[in-house]
Amino acid sequence: MEIILKNPDFEDGLEYWYGKGCKLSLVDSSMFKEISTKYIAVATDRTSEWQGVEQDITGKLGAYKEYKVSAIVRINGSMFSAHVLATLWTKNEAGEEKYITLAK
């Protein structure tokens, strides 16, 4: 299976990754047994559910193709659950934006 994302395991730090509406930092994942990668990205200073980790994949997806999305998400603080979405943001030639939920 072709990997669409660049630096999906954060081995090159936060290169190609951005915080959409939040701060993004990198943390050593050795304290988490269920994570097999060396680093994890942490989104902080979020004030809305749409804010989080993002990467530009313009020109990498094709019509009528199937893609697999997976992630490990942890929450911190007093929350016991969270609403987590994988979202595709698109913008057409007229500048109209659309958000498509890929997974919940």
Image (cartoon, grey):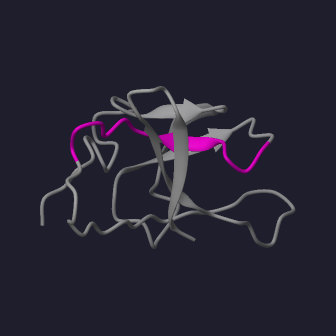
Q: Where is 21 relative to 33, above or below?
A: above
* Horizontal and vertical percent position of residue 72: 48, 65
Q: Quadrant of the N terminus?
A: bottom left
Q: Nearer the viewer, residue 98 or 36?
A: 98
Q: Is residue 49 magenta?
A: yes
Which of the 4 image quarters holds residue 75?
bottom right
Q: Is 86 rendered above or below residue 45? A: below
Q: Residue at horizontal 25%, vertical 41%?
A: 6
Residue 87 place in picture, x, y as percent: 51, 54
Q: How many marks?
A: 0
Compared across the picture, whether 87 is left or right of 39 comes to right
Of residue 9 and residue 90, the one placed in the foreground of this image is: 90
Residue at 51 percent across and 56 percent down: it is 100
Task: Please give the name of the residue rendered at 36% of the width and 33% of the height, measured from the top-left corner.
Answer: 13
Would residue 59 be found to the left or right of residue 79 on screen? Answer: left
Report the predominant secondary structure element of the magenta stretch: loop
Give the image location of residue 80, x and y in percent: 81, 72
Q: In this rendered view, identify the residue nearer to me: 18 or 91.
A: 91
Please state, as top left, top right, bottom left or bottom right, where the C terminus lies in the image: bottom right
Q: Is residue 43 covered in magenta?
A: no
Which span of residues is magenta-colored? 48-60
Residue 12 position in % (x across, y down): 28, 34
User: Along the line of sight, which residue is nearer the eye, 16 or 56?
Assistant: 56
Q: Residue furthest front?
A: 94
- Residue drawn at x 67%, y 47% is 50
> Is 12 placed left or right of 80 in the picture?
left
Image height of 21 relative to 39, above or below:
above
